[in-house]
Image (cartoon, rainbow, N blue to C red):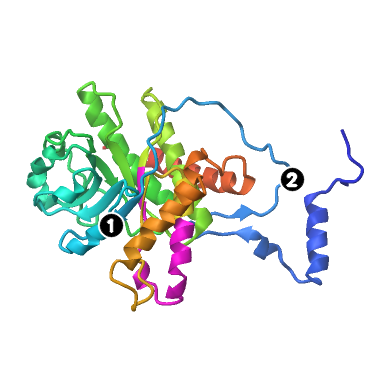
Amino acid sequence: MNFSEFPSSTKALWFEQIKKLSKGENVEDKLIYNPKANIAVPAYCGHEDIFDKSTISVEKSEPFEICVPINLKKRNSFSVLNESIDSVNFKYDGSLIPEELSNYKLHLEIDGSDILNISKLSKHKAGGTITIKSNGSLNDLKIENFSLLKSVNNGFKSLGIDLIVSESKDDSELLSHAMKQADRFIKEKLKTENKDTSDIFFRLPLGTDFYLNLAKIRALKQCWYNLLDNYNLHLRNPFMIVETPDLSLIENETEQNMIRATSMAFASIAGGANVFIPRGLKDIDKQPENFALRMGRNIQLLLKEESFTTLVSDPGKGSYFIENLTKNIAELAWNKFLSSPSE
């Protein structure tokens, strides 16, 4: 069916109109999106239905959590805790967990030297995640930690793939490393005929580019599906913890960090992450000490409870721009993973 009031258009006609509006200036380079991952996405597509579509069945994903980073040595940081908080993040040194945190999920970071102390976490019933921090190498993954991690089985996800330590600026390279580590975990589990992948999770760094953050998270999900499918395992959404860079270290325009954090939080939720951790949200020195923590909490509460963003599944789906960016990152990452030597 044709509608005469909507004349047909082509890419050439579209460029011609743009050039007229720009008074002859060459604007083609400005119409191409080039993120830091060196992926070029054209701003125009002549038709929407360019991707092959297939229906997949994914197990029910875990809900988004309102999480804030706290410092156990600063007891006044506990003031942000209330019924609206689901979980907290902090570095764990092997000490006893304070009673105030007994009902919260704990997303812990622990140095490899302190791993023997994690047995103390067996009394914490709410669970969470345990990330063993390496010495800055994505390959510093010790399979022998499996037996130690099994001692904590009260709902803690203990097979963490920590991409925060990477210095790579290439997102496809980052996700390739993620799949390489996930592959090692799955192979180790299958040796014991354990096909449950629910204790595997990812920690992913965010940048300041909204679209790239959103596509990177979606691409990680796609690569994860590919990996599970490769082993004929049930498809389930990956559990993803994403965190901002230390916003207090941004030299210019620090007064816009609240907007940056909100943009990152929205991209995280829309992409399908489970936990968002704002770092260094401290813009105004005269504000009370816990102002940044409250703002980090409130940003997430507004998006979850008032904007209802967590009730929408994959809102970027169907958008040519986001789909194409996701597809490019995912394909690059998956191909790099396949071409990397097996261990």
Picture residue at 34% right of the left edge, 78% below the top? 286
Q: Residue at x 20, y 48 (%)?
A: 101
Residue designated by label 1: 69
Q: Residues within 10 Å of mark 2 (few under 14, many from 20)?
A: few
In screen coordinates, is 40 left or right of 1?
Answer: left
Please give the range of residues in magenta.
Answer: 240-264
Residue 321 in sight here? yes
Q: Nearer the viewer, residue 23 or 199?
A: 199
Q: With respect to residue 325, does 250 lie above or below?
A: below
Residue visible at 79% across and 65% down? 19
Mark 2, secondary structure of its residue: loop
Q: In the rendered structure, find residue 268 and report the number of the disc placed on it.
A: none
- Residue 260, image x, y percentages: 46, 64
Q: Quadrant of residue 220?
A: top left
Can residue 165 be seen in the rendering of this structure? Answer: no
**Residue 42 in magenta stretch:** no
Q: Give x and y (percent) for residue 193.
A: 23, 21
Amino acid on which disc 1 is placed: Pro
Q: Disc 2 vs disc 1: which is toward the camera? A: 1
Q: On the image, numbered disc 2 is attached to which residue?
A: 46
Please tell me in which quadrant of the rendered image residue 324 appears. Answer: top right
Q: Quadrant of residue 104?
A: top left
Q: Is residue 243 magenta?
A: yes
